[in-house]
Amino acid sequence: MSLYKRIIPCLDVANGRVVKGTNFVNIVDAGDPVEVAKRYDQEGADEIAFLDITATHEDRKTIIETVEKVANEVFIPLTVGGGVSNYSDVLNLLNAGADKVAINSAAVSSPDLINQVTDKIGRQCIVAAIDVKSTSKDTWTVFTHGGRNSTGIDAFEWSKELCDRGAGEILLTSMDRDGTKKGFDLDLLSLISREVTIPVIASGGAGSLEHLKDAVLLGKADAVLAASIFHYSIHSIKEAKEYMKKHGVLVRI
Amino acid sequence: MADIAIIDYGMGNVHSVYKAFNKVINKDSEIKITRSLDDLLDCSHIVFPGQGAASECMSNINKNLDIVEFKKIISQKPFLGICMGLQVLMTHSDENKGSNCLGVLDGEVHSLKSKINTGLKVPHMGWNKIKQAKDHPLWKNIPDESFFYFVHSYYVSPSNKSNILATTTYDLDFVSALYKDNIAAVQFHPEKSSNMGLQLLENFINWNGEIQ
């Protein structure tokens, strides 16, 4: 028996508020993070992810305060990412109440950070986030800094290395699919999910409940992360879980 | 009224545990995060949370607490071990080339990887059901087969099977909760298990340490 598949709504947070927008433009306020996170918890979300989309030095304090407020009221695992660049960033977020911290660009510029953190506090608290673009058939390249910089690193090799360095999970985002609502990149997902021995979270492209199911059944993902289909109230978490269960996916209901 | 002491030996997720208890206690109760034996003597309930590796956990306990005294105190009042706080109660753990543990409960700690089908991922990370093996005050208002959140790579194998409080299936059936007299310990994280987790913590603070 495998493990129950997780559904993780992802909240974009800026200046202490949940925001939504299209490709970072037309950003509108979508509520208080505590209220939104509580609602997702009560609907049956398995975890909550927070992405600090401003992620600038000045806003660090705001995201820490936001994490604290949410962690006081929401009792499911909380992952926080965006702009995490060193060990003290990780510790500050964990101390504020995050259970896991997502590290992206910093893992590429200083891969030892992953070893350093996981040696000290365990692999369960590090989510290695990878943003990738397809470069040729069956080949994907890692990008950093919100997708602006190509590293030339092969996504498949990089996933294996992150796993060896001690990451607890991989959050795999297809930049080709992100925001398109055309579904996850299933070839990419299944390539990496089959190879690494840690859980893979599918991200980028969820536009329907069918996409969530496909990420698990065809892409072999262990968890699915989605933003817009839940934020815009197109579907509730409960609906998503009932749909997945009906199609043979093991979910917590 | 309960005065809860949460043991902090420098590597647990004590803040999450604190926040969750803070949600369920009444106003007269107090929660302390502590590494002092005096606080453990004074409180009514002891909680021992933990993450990380057994050997490191044991060396941190050795550094911060007098083990003989510690074991004496924890035999006297309701005690809840969480995750690593369960594993270190056992006699010995295989983690990191092997490490002796507190020996409060007889049994071993083994690696999940050595026992399960290779297609399954370790750590066992996520939500899973627990099957209640017997009645216990901890299970009040918690239906059998409720979901709890797990993150671990090792599991406990107690010598005395009658101490088993719950099991969980992840290819193998492993022990997800144990008890002995005033001691209860769980492999999962009630502080991260939504409503059922909070219910369990509330049950713990309402428990006087006796088994009916």
Image (cartoon, coloured by chain):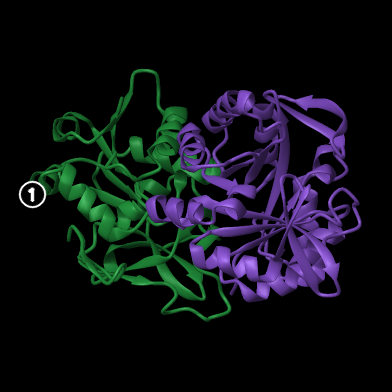
Chain colours: A purple, B green
Point out residue B207 in the picture as x, y percentages from the top left corner: 31, 39
Say above or below: B69 vs B117.
Answer: above
Point out residue B92 in the picture as x, y percentages from the top left corner: 22, 67
Q: Secondary structure at mark 1?
A: helix
Identify the residue shown where x is 37% and y is 54%.
Answer: B52
Residue B21 falls in which quadrant of the image?
top left
Residue A13 falls in which quadrant of the image?
top right
Q: Which chain is home to disc 1?
A: B
Quadrant of the image for the N terminus of chain B? Answer: top left
Point out residue A78 in the picture as x, y percentages from the top left corner: 58, 42
User: Total marks drawn?
Assistant: 1
Say above or below: A164 vs A64.
Answer: below
Identify the residue shown where x is 31% and y is 55%.
Answer: B86
Seen as rendered, the residue at the extreme top is: B28
The answer to whether one can see residue A108 in this image is yes
Say above or below: B77 vs B56.
Answer: above
Identify the residue shown where x is 64% and y is 49%.
Answer: A105
* Residue marked by disc 1: B68
Seen as rendered, the residue at the extreme left is: B68
Identify the residue shown where x is 51% and y is 71%.
Answer: B170
Say above or below: B165 vs B171.
Answer: above
Q: Amino acid at mark 1?
A: Val
Q: Is residue A207 left or right of residue B52?
A: right
The answer to whether one can see residue B74 in this image is no
Point out residue A132 in the picture as x, y percentages from the top left corner: 76, 59
Q: Is residue B47 left or right of residue B18?
A: left
> Would you call the spot at circle 1 few (<14 residues within 10 Å), some (14-19), or many (20 or more)?
few
Q: Is residue B89 left or right of residue B170?
A: left
